[in-house]
Image: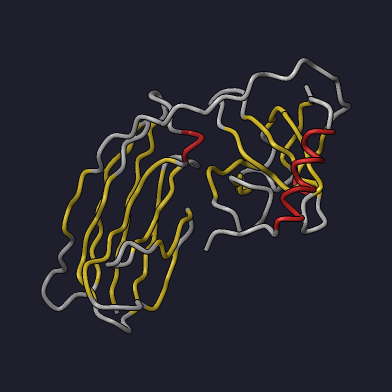
Amino acid sequence: MKFQYPLASITALLMTLAAAPSLADTATIQASLGSRVNVRAEPSTTSLILHHGLGGDRVNVLNQTNAPDGFVWYFIEFPTSRARGWIRGDLLKVSATVPINPPAPVNPPAPIVNPPTSERVSFARRTSAATVGGTVQGTQTRDYVLNAALGQTLRISTIGTSQFLQVQVFAPDGTLLYTGSRDWSGILPSTGDYRIRVRLVPEAQQPNTIGEYSLTIAVL
């Protein structure tokens, strides 16, 4: 559910943004090396996750605000991909502020996404697991579809050659059940076709970035 700000909070937020100086700061994402930090569409932990940053990444700070949750949030940009979004202040180490002329607001162009390739997964007789594999490059995604029943447990184990590999699990109604790069297990909420998607994390979807993977899927 998308977070809704009260009218008074929205007014305060806009006044804060208008009063804040434009920034030319650089900052470092504060997390253990390789750990992911959410980059969100709005300054709230309930807002849509647009991208992920990694611990140690350097970013440009474009603006900041004191959000209703009591935290300072920073509007940042990744210097290579130009991906933008909000990160909570306690997850950044920001350098000294250098005022610059504010850039004209722009709407980022929609990324070009290759249509996913899809493959139905079936289990050998008297088994409850199967292993698939392949590679993804740039914006490419690979989907694996399997039928499972309400109350069964789905387990996924991933081995990959790239730290940027990401796995998503979708329920039959399209609800996103999981996004991450670690092994996952969950009890299924309904009967139907589940979709397991392998891709690179959005900020790493460059034409020359390739990830090879092996994915083991089990239904118990």
According to the image, what is the colour scheme of the structure? secondary structure
Relative vertical location of residue 30 with respect to residue 182 in this rendering, above or below: above
Picture coordinates of residue 148, whole percent (x, y): 23, 74
Query: Horizontal and vertical percent for residue 150?
Result: 29, 82
Counting from the top left corner in percent of width and height, residue 172 is at 27, 67
Please count the marks in the image: 0
Residue at 16% from the left image edge and 58% from the top image edge? 120
Q: Is residue 156 left or right of residue 81?
A: left
Residue 137 placement: quadrant: top left
Tell me if residue 130 comes above or below residue 76 in the rendering: below
Q: Residue drawn 63% across and 47% down?
A: 42
Q: Residue 64's x, y, as percent?
A: 77, 38
Please indicate whether residue 27 sits to the left or right of residue 98 in the image.
left
Q: Please determine whether, in this image, residue 56 is positioned above or below residue 44.
A: above
Q: Residue at x 57, y 23 (%)?
A: 80
As drawn, which residue projects farthest toward the bottom? 151
